[in-house]
Image (cartoon, coloured by chain):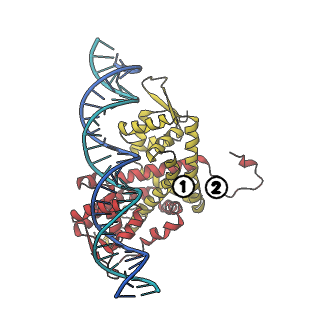
Chain colours: A yellow, B red, C cyan, D blue
Amino acid sequence: MTDVSSSAVSLPASSLFMREDEIRRGVELLYFGYTRLTNAIDQELAKQGLGRAHHRALYFIARQPDLTVGDLLKLLAITKQSLGRVLKDLHERDLVITKSGIVDRRQKLLRLTDSGSKLEQELFQQLSQKLSSAYASAGQEAVTGFWHVLEGLVPEADRQMVFDLRKERT
Amino acid sequence: MTDVSSSAVSLPASSLFMREDEIRRGVELLYFGYTRLTNAIDQELAKQGLGRAHHRALYFIARQPDLTVGDLLKLLAITKQSLGRVLKDLHERDLVITKSGIVDRRQKLLRLTDSGSKLEQELFQQLSQKLSSAYASAGQEAVTGFWHVLEGLVPEADRQMVFDLRKERT
DNA sequence: AAGATACGTCAACATGACTGACGTATCTTC
DNA sequence: GAAGATACGTCAGTCATGTTGACGTATCTT
């Protein structure tokens, strides 16, 4: 490591020469925070004989009804084959239905059935409890900071896709 | 949902009746932020023939040299069998060495070799670039907010263990 | 009519998790 | 000093979820 402190230029607060410990703290909290949040629903999922992959699909279909298979593939960033298995399971359990697209009949539009919606809401409930309580104890200002940092982790190329989840409600 | 707004009690800002959209926003950003951060090192790991599981072990051993196998198991929250495979790989590639404990000779203390340390630093470099830039674009205040929310996601029972990563340097 | 696209599906394989059982060395306790 | 608890390693088998590459069918675009 170069001796940064002896440098003649004064570094701005937004410098890339961030203290290692602040970065490690972020890496660790992100790891533990993320895993503990997702752990919250494992038991519930196991009861249904489903896994995390199923929940991710369920979640995004709930979030954006009439999502196409292609769009879901982009969101999940997995292969067609992997997603195929997951959707097949969700179909067999009558949690998801598809209909062909109106503007483009090659597309399949995904939507939750009533029981799929009920399950997704139960799972969301668990996530919500955990995250609400974290939001509450940190305060509103912390929450917006939390969002901003995470937004900065999403590459420019993906950012629109993520933001669109909040807009394209059918 | 009950009609909360007609309730006689006024809800504090820290209410558990958080708006669904704020929760979904957090869930999504956490998912995309976490996955995009970890994606940053996949290519580098693949070059070495290692996977994410190896990196997690490498990371924590770097973070807390002379960590015992048992403590690493608690941090990773996986089974002995799973960790065993990972440590065996790291051993074979001369990235990690163990020595038996001094106070308790049953324990094995884990430490990175020079090449292990070099690799971990390269990988950390990737994470650091991504996270520093997210920190920088969000600002210092956002960063502390980010930390606070994530801390709230770690259950009380695990919190000490996570915080101790920043203290128990040998 | 030709080519591109959306989706499904085949076979084969890799990674990283799991369970449950058992063995050995070492520490603790009576 | 013996009995039991603990730290670690390991066996065998299984599961969930990801991968590649190829190919088929329906449908849209040009």
Task: Identify which amino acid the numbered label 1 is placed on.
Answer: Thr
Mark 2 crowd level (few <14, some 14–19, many ≥20, 10 Å Cα): some
Mark 1 crowd level (few <14, some 14–19, many ≥20, 10 Å Cα): many
Circle on res. A135: none
Residue B96 is left or right of residue A128, and the answer is left
Residue B129 found in image quarter: bottom left
Q: Secondary structure at mark 2?
A: loop
Residue B22 image point, x, y percent: 57, 49
Q: Secondary structure at mark 1?
A: helix
Q: Is residue B55 above or below residue C13?
A: below
Q: In this orientation, does residue A8 appear?
A: no
Residue A44 image point, x, y percent: 53, 50
Circle on res. A144: 1
Question: Where, quadrant-wise, is the N terminus of chain A in this rendering?
Answer: bottom left
Residue A113 image point, x, y percent: 55, 34
Numbered disc total: 2
Circle on res. B16: 2
Task: Identify which amino acid the numbered label 2 is placed on.
Answer: Leu
Residue C16 found in image quarter: bottom left
Asked if both marks, 2 and 1, belong to the same chain, the answer given is no
Residue under the point 33% across and 63% down? B57
Residue under the point 45% across and 22% down? A105
Q: Is residue D7 above or below residue B153?
A: below
Residue B25 image point, x, y percent: 53, 48
